[in-house]
Amino acid sequence: MRSLEVKNRTSAEEIKSLRLITAVKTPYLPDGRFDLEAYDALMNMQIMNGVEGVIVGGTTGEGHLMSWDEHIMLIGHTVNCFGGSIKVIGNTGSNSTREAIHATEQGFAVGMHAALHINPYYGKTSLEGLVSHFEAVLSMGPTIVYNVPSRTGQDIPPSVIHTVSQSANMAGVKECVGNDRIKEYTDEGVVVWSGNDDQCHDARWGYGATGVISVTSNLVPGLMRELMFGGKNTCLNKKLMPLIEWLFREPNPIGLNTALAQLGVVRPIFRLPYVPLSLAKRVEFVEIVKQLGRENFVGERDVQVLDDDEFILVGRY
Amino acid sequence: MRSLEVKNRTSAEEIKSLRLITAVKTPYLPDGRFDLEAYDALMNMQIMNGVEGVIVGGTTGEGHLMSWDEHIMLIGHTVNCFGGSIKVIGNTGSNSTREAIHATEQGFAVGMHAALHINPYYGKTSLEGLVSHFEAVLSMGPTIVYNVPSRTGQDIPPSVIHTVSQSANMAGVKECVGNDRIKEYTDEGVVVWSGNDDQCHDARWGYGATGVISVTSNLVPGLMRELMFGGKNTCLNKKLMPLIEWLFREPNPIGLNTALAQLGVVRPIFRLPYVPLSLAKRVEFVEIVKQLGRENFVGERDVQVLDDDEFILVGRY
Amino acid sequence: MRSLEVKNRTSAEEIKSLRLITAVKTPYLPDGRFDLEAYDALMNMQIMNGVEGVIVGGTTGEGHLMSWDEHIMLIGHTVNCFGGSIKVIGNTGSNSTREAIHATEQGFAVGMHAALHINPYYGKTSLEGLVSHFEAVLSMGPTIVYNVPSRTGQDIPPSVIHTVSQSANMAGVKECVGNDRIKEYTDEGVVVWSGNDDQCHDARWGYGATGVISVTSNLVPGLMRELMFGGKNTCLNKKLMPLIEWLFREPNPIGLNTALAQLGVVRPIFRLPYVPLSLAKRVEFVEIVKQLGRENFVGERDVQVLDDDEFILVGRY
Amino acid sequence: MRSLEVKNRTSAEEIKSLRLITAVKTPYLPDGRFDLEAYDALMNMQIMNGVEGVIVGGTTGEGHLMSWDEHIMLIGHTVNCFGGSIKVIGNTGSNSTREAIHATEQGFAVGMHAALHINPYYGKTSLEGLVSHFEAVLSMGPTIVYNVPSRTGQDIPPSVIHTVSQSANMAGVKECVGNDRIKEYTDEGVVVWSGNDDQCHDARWGYGATGVISVTSNLVPGLMRELMFGGKNTCLNKKLMPLIEWLFREPNPIGLNTALAQLGVVRPIFRLPYVPLSLAKRVEFVEIVKQLGRENFVGERDVQVLDDDEFILVGRY
């Protein structure tokens, strides 16, 4: 079902050069549908602050809470509106090979520049099964493979990465296992993005990582740009740590969702099973914003604590 | 769920000016999925021959045989690849208001320029219900309302058109009831496209129609361009009649599907319940092509009769 | 995907003997989901009053406003709760052969006793296409073919019925074209149910019809039972005419939906594009109920006119 | 959307008494659809050998590789055919609360006796989020909560179980963390099924577990019945260990799928990302069957090694 006409078709080489990619948040309306106006605003903030690519419907963007038609629509929308200014990487991975094939085919058809593929989480499979899964989608276009065993329950070992790296479409690995694993890959010429914001500075400047696929850059895109482009900067890295630690105290994107609502750039609406951080933690965030400087964060409103009853939790949507 | 960022956003006024719109054929692979390479080639032929807009997934494009995710993907694909050269009008209508709302929202989100909306066929409804149905989608963007009682079982009467025409998004009507009805509308300033290829010349030059939404232009886009732009031309119109009559002997798009396969521009694959025209009729088509001149038709291969067993009919896909 | 284990498996012969089949209404909750408690109550009223079969998700039951998973769920639910007391005929037809195949396979898997199949409405097809469409589903189980050209835009001619009647699964035809067409079939031994309540008495007693697939029996199941089982009864037939005429003044199921809400057996909730009958017509209905006798209608509450603002119209659900 | 009519409605108390529940395998046809004949045969083998309940579409049954309509259809089918002989527990859990709500509602509507609910795997959430997730579905009917951190990436801690146990619908926990955790629960009166076949004997006879939700019982239901009902039997437990160890060398259900194909009770068809065990391991299985006795396994054909090319792997279905 390939098309040769897709505009802005991107090569794996171009993807390999991206240093700052944001796993962008998906904002919602009170009935749980996408809030495209807020989304577009977030995208513009990313672009204006030097972010080079976005993961659409990643774990952070809650792709696992989307129907596939919503998901592909959001990829198509992002390509249409912002595809000339930023690389659009669709998270078309799944623990079902069928779904991954179908979504990836559709994602490339609507113009995404690259696909992000996870190994089959929860269901898991054998090493041979892992290779079969990735090979079923690699022929479709530039691909980033994503390893996050703390979510999937199964590490993608280097042997599997070596096998799939033989495909010309393989752009690289988003790796969350740590910087030693990253060094193992970069020593061999495999492109790697750190998937851990707290390690990404060291990964970039000390372990050969090309850059980061970041959650924190939703909030402070300019500072993350500086961290990835401005040379080794342990001072800035240290300054960011309280924010990063705060963000990941509960499973991501709970912290991010709460923070963006407090910053007034998205409505305080959560799709279950996510619920906002507690009042005490929200107070901490206000303090963190003051420390880092409001001007470094996205949005222009005063940061707010928000009352518990200002949040809307949506189960049916 | 509106976005203000969508590229190439088009006003209803721009849609009103289109004279030649093709209800483009959807070609298939042997397993029933879309053949995007063939589709892209068809689109390029349309653009090169002066067609100004396409209906994606219309009755001709077999939108009723698509899942909605396929349908929206095809709209997004068409916008991405050709949206700068041609207006993309998504047939996001349905006999279910819920489906029409959902699809129209998604179609505009991926960048379509206008929506085509049918009245609720098969299920039908009251006049109040018709108005409610159209009002549920009109706020989303430029809209063409489609009236074809021979398919829907229910005429959209002028009173309903008058009511919905109060919306600034209402671009006009695709009308199949005949040229007297067209005149009734154009006298009042309502923009109309003829939905009948055999009447469109007269509609354009004698009854005030803006143009045509055409099936025949899939095959002879240049001649249809001449018919809509070149001034009154009864000679050309008469010359086209044998082709048009041949095309509509069985319910559309049976004739079109058969013809495009014979011309070698799509594979001879049908999604059921459509089946190809008989051998005898396929022989007739070869003769028609000779009469009109192969060079006036799309594609570059010799026109073929094709054997019955060269056609593939797909039920599960 | 056949199963040989399905309980209460029914033969085409058993389906052929049913005289009174109700095209049962689907009631809704305020958010547009199914109101299963009201549905179950309706089903019990049908069973207690001698109705022998139900069409689930027919035109009357608004199958065209259901997602397929809702539709199959409702069939499965009906089989589970009432399949021992009444024949459950799933409307698993579609104008898309793919959808008809998929839904019919699923409907039989969850235990439905027979399928109702429409010809491809709106899209239409050739006679060969019609036969291919029906043959794609006939092997799956007992089947009733439904002909209603005023909705589909295309008559199923006797030649097609003769061809499909060669299948052992063909139970018969639901015919809306009129009693002459019915006689043509019954003279040849084809089983027919009248699809027009106003003609069903004559069809049954004068033209050889086996019975009726009825809308009116939702409201007055006992009287319709009498009409089909009690011998020729022009007096009762005449008495029912005002009700039947009232029911069909707007496209079905608008009248039925309004009436059941007025009788207090379903909530006054409409899925768009259906909207309730006007106040004037609702007043008429109260009068009709008085004339025929409240005790002949389903439910036990006083019949009400209802205010316009008591009705809820749902577009997103 | 509750129905009070559903047949064989089961109380949480009845669910609590089940000692042997099989997480039943879903067999496939060569095109990847369900093989209902093979499924029905498997179900009959389970019932005849004393299994009291089945998990439909569990991890073992590859619910994560099903579309939801397939999944609900299989639950409805199982209830229709076998619901009088065995308890049908639908795995209507999901990492998306929306999906869990929708599927659970549908599963109970088609008659399932209980739901199995996992915590949100991969996406994860906070403890408050876990409680919100389970509370969104607990009101619908009897529920088993499933804890398997090696797949989900997140342990359900006892505090969450205590909170959800306040619901009258909470039947108990399928626990994979180990027998100490099981003892903690059973000491407090919480019903637990072991989710680890290698620990279930000790769990049942030494740690208070009510029974097991088993994979191995697909293959040797009679022996597992003996293990759960026949009193402490370390000899039988030891005898089963080589089989159990073989089964779980690769992520389940890879071993089970391979074994059932070798036993000739399902076709050798795998939905990706699962692939069969290697030839060497298949040879081992033949030996294990000989050791335990062919007569203790399901099916009647000779156990086979099967060639690699006898297996069919399906990606699109």
Image (cartoon, coloured by chain):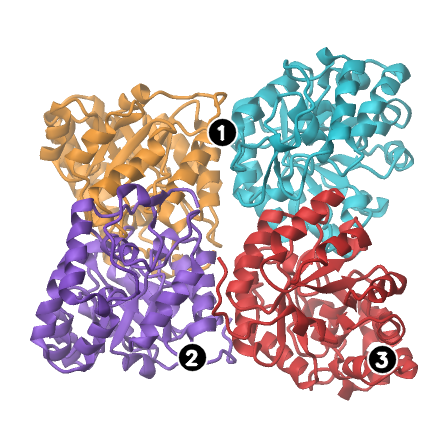
Chain colours: A red, B purple, C orange, D cyan
Amino acid carrying mark 2 in the image: Gly
Q: Of helix, strand and loop, which one carries label 3?
A: helix
User: Is residue B117 something one can see in this rendering?
Assistant: yes
Viewed as shown, does residue D238 lie left or right of C203? right
Q: Quadrant of residue D255?
A: top right
Q: Chain of mark 1?
A: C
Share a chain, discs 1 and 3? no
Share a chain, discs 2 and 3? no
Tell me where residue B64 appears, x and y as whole percent.
35, 54
For the residues bearing labels 1 and 3, Cβ distance under 8 angstroms? no
Tell me where residue A118 appears, x and y as whole percent.
70, 56
For the residues bearing labels 2 and 3, Cβ distance under 8 angstroms? no
- The image shows residue C212, relative to residue B251, as above or below, that is above
* Residue in the image at 22% along x and 54% along y: B255
Q: Which is nearer the eye, A147 or C273?
A: A147
Mark 2 and mark 3: span between their CA atoms?
48 Å
Q: Residue furthest front?
A: B302
Q: Quadrant of residue D184?
A: top right
Viewed as shown, does residue D11 lie left or right of A279? left
Q: Residue furthest bottom?
A: A295
Mark 1 and mark 3: span between their CA atoms?
58 Å
Q: Which is nearer the eye, C215 or A188?
A: A188
Residue neighbourhood size for the residue with mark 3, other residues' Cα within 10 Å, grouped as few (<14), some (14–19), many (≥20): some
Check disc 3 and report the residue beneath it.
A287
Check disc 2 and report the residue beneath it.
B84
Q: Quadrant of residue D207?
A: top right
Amino acid carrying mark 1 in the image: Asn
Check disc 1 and report the residue beneath it.
C80
Q: Chain of mark 2?
A: B
User: Is residue B102 something one can see in this rendering?
Assistant: no
Amino acid carrying mark 3 in the image: Glu
